[in-house]
Image: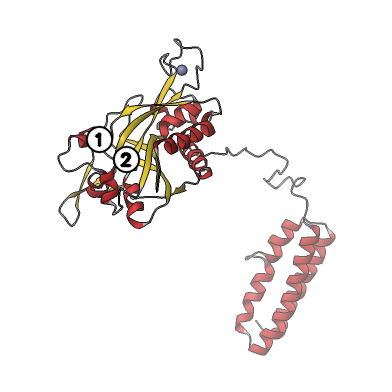
Amino acid sequence: MNKQEWLEKLSALRNEFEKAAAEKKSSQDIERDFLSKKGGLALLLRDLSAFSIEEKKELGSLGNDFKKKVAEYCAENSSNPVSDKKSDLDITLCGHPYPKGHSHPIIITMEKIISSMNKLGFSLEYGPLAERDYYNFEALNFPPDHPARDMQDTFYLNQKDEKGINYLLRTHTSPVQIRVMQSKKPPLRVISAGKVFRSEAVDASHSFVFHQLEGFCADKNISMSDLKWTLESFIKDMFGSAAKIRFSPSYFPFVEPGAGVEVSCVFCSSSKGKCPVCKGTGWLEMLGAGMIHPEVFKACGYNPDEISGFAFGAGIERFAMLLYGISDMRQLYENDLRILKNL
Ligand SMILES: [Zn+2]
């Protein structure tokens, strides 16, 4: 093809376009006939490859001017897709509502507890889930072969630490206490929360993985009354100002004295004898607590004659069950949307 022939073809295309525009052909048709990859103009521009550079410049600019003109025409005359019968898009149709999720009740409860303890001046710390025997047991006054180790059925891992002792999945959040006390100096007010693991059969109130809250304070002149005030303020913040707590003697190797902490039943208040949650006692066992054992302070390099402190722990599932009125802990793990949606 020579230059003259090319120009004639372009001129023919121009005429075709004028005719199509005069006939008010749809902009989609014009776009297809002139601008698409197989349209007349695209083919004509492709033919330019055989021409010299000067000719390419001259003819290419003419071709592009025409292309611009067609594109402008199409943009100005493009029909409204709503009224265009050929379009599949109907913007008048309602969309499908996309379901919005929310955090899991255990996470919501954990965040509530953390924010409540933050208000009392406790800061959040984390620890590893795969823990050394030393942090999980020994430093917490569970020496090797101590019978109290049997209270916590433990998952041991195959990997050994440098002393040849197997790593384990932490059975409680208390190792965080040791890690923090060994790396920081008192005064300390710290909480930790997260997953813990025990080799337990799953039933309405037990699971092999669950969540714990841990809190401790280490400072000069800390007494049991500080512990009681802290827990009372925390429980009232969680369950309302009418909630009460009471202490009873209990045993944990890392505290002395140790206490079980019960909270007045938030479900029955005064209708004792009928409430299934507290079995009619009016009280719910919620936390374990006590004054940090002198042996624990020694393991962390503190002098127990100078420093005293309290510690407490609780199952987060227990709080979630009370806050959401769930009677079977398994409902929190089964991921049944019919339940989770209603929480
Ligand atoms: Zn009750």
Rendering coords of residue 38 (x, y %): 63, 65
Ligand 1 near label 2 (Cβ, under 8 Å)? no
Marks 1 and 2, how far apart at CA: 9 Å
Q: Are marks 1 and 2 in contact (CB under 8 Å)?
A: yes
Q: Circle 2 is placed at which residue position?
A: 172
Q: How is the image coloured?
A: secondary structure
Q: Is mark 1 within 8 Å of ligand 1?
A: no
Q: Which one is earlier in the sequence, the residue at label 1 or at label 2? A: 1
- Residue 54, quarter of the rendered image: bottom right
Is the residue 36 above or below the residue 57 in the image?
Answer: above
Picture coordinates of residue 73, whole percent (x, y): 79, 64
Residue at (24, 33) in percent of width and height: 151
The foreground one among 309 and 332 is 309
- Give the quarter of the figure containing the N terminus: bottom right
Secondary element type, mark 1? loop
Residue occupying image coordinates x 83% and y 58%: 23
Q: Is residue 5 visible?
A: no
- Residue sitting at the far top: 273
Q: Is residue 201 left or right of residue 247?
A: left
Question: Quadrant location of residue 75?
Answer: bottom right
Q: Secondary structure at mark 2?
A: loop
Q: Is residue 313 visible?
A: yes
Q: Nearer the viewer, residue 305 or 49?
A: 305
Q: Which residue in the protein does label 1 denote?
A: 152
Residue in the picture at 62% in, 38% down: 96
Residue at 52% across / 40% down in the picture? Answer: 116
Instruction: For label 1, count other residues whose C-alpha is less than 10 Å away and answer few (under 14), some (14-19) or many (20+).
Output: some
Looking at the image, residue 223 sits to the left or right of residue 49; the answer is left
Mark 1 residue type: Gln
Looking at the image, residue 2 lies above or below residue 327: below
Type of amino acid under label 2: His
